[in-house]
Image (cartoon, rainbow, N blue to C red):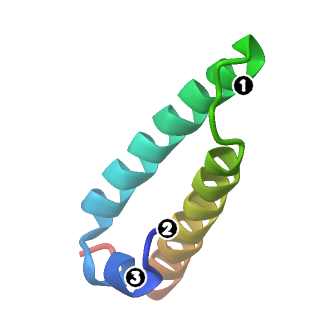
Amino acid sequence: MIDIKEIRLKKFDDIKNILNDLLDEQFKLKLQAASGQLAKSSEKRRVKKDIARIKTVLKEMKENGWTR
């Protein structure tokens, strides 16, 4: 799980890179689930929640003009 306090300390571009990595991971987990190779179904839920946290922080940064 990603700590939201740590995310807020990072630069805008770094956060976007983390988001892209998580989206790639989510895609891979979906493929594993579809083929029956997913060991932990909780991983999909964790990644989904991390993506939501990051998108929330990005939205806050955009609204407040913090795109450093």
Label 3 sits on what residue type?
Gly
User: Mark 1 vs mark 2: which is more N-terminal?
Assistant: 2
Residue for badge 1: 33
Residue drawn at x 26%, y 74% as measured from the top left = 10
Describe residue 12's horizontal placement relative to residue 23 as left or right.
Answer: left
Please name the amino acid that badge 1 sits on. Answer: Ala
Residue 11 x/y as whole percent: 24, 71
Vertical placement of residue 68 versus 48, above or below = below
Front: mark 3 or 1: 1
Q: Nearer the viewer, residue 58 or 27?
A: 27
Q: Compared to 63, does 46 lie above or below?
A: above
Within 10 angstroms of label 1, few (less than 14), some, or many (20 or more) residues?
some
- Please give the label number shown on residue 1: 2
Task: Say which label, 3 or 1, has the lower sequence index.
Answer: 1
Task: Identify the amino acid type marked 2.
Answer: Met
Percent x, y for residue 42? Answer: 69, 51
Query: Which mark is drawn over residue 65?
Result: 3
